[in-house]
């Protein structure tokens, strides 16, 4: 059984300082939409600008002759975050968007070279134990997995207290929240296993290499290598197991649609198709922004949902920008997506599937260190018709295939690289996931490359998930939601705290809005 979704915590009281001041949000990704709705719910007059003609950023949709594809995110976890944003306005998410739980959560196909086999990841722990015992032919992996989940829960508790819904930009902020020398904080710090990677931690619990490959794949939710990411990210396993995997009826696109509707009801003014070119300042403090049509708009504060590095590079200048840009910030991975409208769906796959590489070490070496596409990648396959047949003509499937690639490196021309990599991906699906006749089933085809991701979403080097979480000590920390350099500037989105993925960017939007509200603003 999937654990019930806990009620969203109550909204904190308003600060009472100029809550009707005009605020701008740059970018209508999920983080920007969440920030806009939260600020509007607290009484601010919000205008949201996005350079694209659509809102939702990466949570976009593509439709073609009866097929409907979510173009970006497809796995929704932690819906409590979304509920909390609706609760800000005294609204119930269920009135805006229907979400249904999916269990098993993933079906995993393993390469023959790695031992082969198919394993379903399910939230129910008794069922998972049976699956693991049958799959591995022993009990040590299921015992190790159960112990790992307990550890993941402990990490999640620590994150809840020190990391989530709080403006945090580094270890000092978390220590301030915990009280520097309390014994409890020291115990929490020990639990973080600082210096140890996710990959090492997982293998300390789970002896079967295929099960370990599955478990450490959670770091792909943040586009980072398991052997370079801090152990605290093992907490993602608990978020998914206890919080569940959910599908919004209408596709992931239903999430931004719901947030846009909420924002409209709260008075948010949306300005799609409007590129912001500068954040204006007087005496160092934000005064508004300039748009590509040359107009200047005055605002009391600005929330940037644009990538944090690009915000500093392109929208700011002077010492404030230089200070931020002095620190090396590595983009998370990018990816290639195939959108395949199939005449006939496959009956042996579930809604979410992972078709694993033969060797995770080789795969991550290519993606994260060599900076080249992996010759034998892991493919994530989404088959939404399993849950919502209306995504395709009768009996068909709107198949979505995502393979992670390195972020864009100089000289990489994906227009030239794509045809061969498409063949690599299709071959992988044929040989490891039993989709031998895949090409015969394709009626409609579209794709997205790292270059497309870069151009469409205005991200850093084509990164899907903002900044990488690399560094086994401090890799989980991202730039804080309040700019330490520029008063009146806040950040929301995958490259700001607490990081990427749908729930985290929406939490980022809420936190940016909450921090702004607590700080208080002067009128524009
Ligand atoms: C292929 C793919 C698959 C994914 N799968 C999943 C998944 O299954 N589950 C999951 O949880 N997450 C997934 N993600 C990640 C998730 O989609 C992102 O973390 C999240 O949607 C990013 O939201 P964001 O708030 O950072 O904004 P973004 O979506 O990055 O949007 C930022 C917006 O800002 C706008 N902008 C930037 N600069 C300017 C400017 N100067 N002026 C005006 N507008 C500007 C851009 O046009 C863009 O619309 C996936 C992403 C991709 C691309």
Image (tube, rainbow, N blue to C red):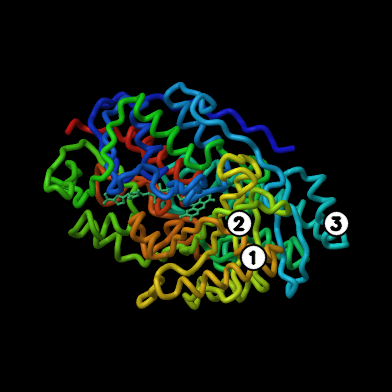
Looking at the rendering, which quadrant does residue 8 occupy?
A: top right
Q: Residues within 10 Å of mark 2 (few under 14, many from 20)?
A: many
Residue 376 appears in the rendering: yes
Q: In 3D space, how far apart are the residues under numbered discs 2 and 3 (Cα atoms)?
A: 25 Å
Mark pair 2, 1: CA separation: 9 Å
Question: Distance of mark 1 from mark 3, alpha carbons?
Answer: 26 Å
- Vertical side of 417 occupied by 397: above or below: above
Q: Secondary structure at mark 1?
A: helix
Q: Closest to the observer: 482 or 244?
A: 244
Judge depth for marks 2 and 3 and give the one in front. Answer: 2
Which callout, 2 or 1, points at the residue further toward the start of the chain? 2
**516 or 126, which is in the foreground?**
126
Front-most of 136 and 11? Answer: 136
Name the residue beneath numbered marker 1.
429
Q: Which mark is residue 133?
A: 3
Tell me residue 360's x, y (percent): 64, 70
Q: Residue at x 43, y 67 (%)?
A: 407
User: Residue 428 location, x and y as percent?
Assistant: 63, 69
Residue 196 visible, this angle: no
Disc 2 to disc 1: CB gap under 8 Å: yes
Task: Classify the position of the C terminus by image quarter.
Answer: top left
Q: Secondary structure at mark 2?
A: strand
Number of callouts? 3
Give the quarter of the image for residue 436: bottom right
* In the image, residue 16 above or below residue 25: above
Q: Is mark 3 within 8 Å of ligand 1?
A: no
Q: Left of 223 or right of it: where is 512?
A: left
Q: Nearer the viewer, residue 321 or 269?
A: 269
Q: Which mark is residue 381?
A: 2
Residue 89's label in the rendered image is none
Residue 489 placement (x, y as % from top left): 27, 45
Closer to the N terminus: mark 1 or mark 3? 3
């Amino acid at each position: 059984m999937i654990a019930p979704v806990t009620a969203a915590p109550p909204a904190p009281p308003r600060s009472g300082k100029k809550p009707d001041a005009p605020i701008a949000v740059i970018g209508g990704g999920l983080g920007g939409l969440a920030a806009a709705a939260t600020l509007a719910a607290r009484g601010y007059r919000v205008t949201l600008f996005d350079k694209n003609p659509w809102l939702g950023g990466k949570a976009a949709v593509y439709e073609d002759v009866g097929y409907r594809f979510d173009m970006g995110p497809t796995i929704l976890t932690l819906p409590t975050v979304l509920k909390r944003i609706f609760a800000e306005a005294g609204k119930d998410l269920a009135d805006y968007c229907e979400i249904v739980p999916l269990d098993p959560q993933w079906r995993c196909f393993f390469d023959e070279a790695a031992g082969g086999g198919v394993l379903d990841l399910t939230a129910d722990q008794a069922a998972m134990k049976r699956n693991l015992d049958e799959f591995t032919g022993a009990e040590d992996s299921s015992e190790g997995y159960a112990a790992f989940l307990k550890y993941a829960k402990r990490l999640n508790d620590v994150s809840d207290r020190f990391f989530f819904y709080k403006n945090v930009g580094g270890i000092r902020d978390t220590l301030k929240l915990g009280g520097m020398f309390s014994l409890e904080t020291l115990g929490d710090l020990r639990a973080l296993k600082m210096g140890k990677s996710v990959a090492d931690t997982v293998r300390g619990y789970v002896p079967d290499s295929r099960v370990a490959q599955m478990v450490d794949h959670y770091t792909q939710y943040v586009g980072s290598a398991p052997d370079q990411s801090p152990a605290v990210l093992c907490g993602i396993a608990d978020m998914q197991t206890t919080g569940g995997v959910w599908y919004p009826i209408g596709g992931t696109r239903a999430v931004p649609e719901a947030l846009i509707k909420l924002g409209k009801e709260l008075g948010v003014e949306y300005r799609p198709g409007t590129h912001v070119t500068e954040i204006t300042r007087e005496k160092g403090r934000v005064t508004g922004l300039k748009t590509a049509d040359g107009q200047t708009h005055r605002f009391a504060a600005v929330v940037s949902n644009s990538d944090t590095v690009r915000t500093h590079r392109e929208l700011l200048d002077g010492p404030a920008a230089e200070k931020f840009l002095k620190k090396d910030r590595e983009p998370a991975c990018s990816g290639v997506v195939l959108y395949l409208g199939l005449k006939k769906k496959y009956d042996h796959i579930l809604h979410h599937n992972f078709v694993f590489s033969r060797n995770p070490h080789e795969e991550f070496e290519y993606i994260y260190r060599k900076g080249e596409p992996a010759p034998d990648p892991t493919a994530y396959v989404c088959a939404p018709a399993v849950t919502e047949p209306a995504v395709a003509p009768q009996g068909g499937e709107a198949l979505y295939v995502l393979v992670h690639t390195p972020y864009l490196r100089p000289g990489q021309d994906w227009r030239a690289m794509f045809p061969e990599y498409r063949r690599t991906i299709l071959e992988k699906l044929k040989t490891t996931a039993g989709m031998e006749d895949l090409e015969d089933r394709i009626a409609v085809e579209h794709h997205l490359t790292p270059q497309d991701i870069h151009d469409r979403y205005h991200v850093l080097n084509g990164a899907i998930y903002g900044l990488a979480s690399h560094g086994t000590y401090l890799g989980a920390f991202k730039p804080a939601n309040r700019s330490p350099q520029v008063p009146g500037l806040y950040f929301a989105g995958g490259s700001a705290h607490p990081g990427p993925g749908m729930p985290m960017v929406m939490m980022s939007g809420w936190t940016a809005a909450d921090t702004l509200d607590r700080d208080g603003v002067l009128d524009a």
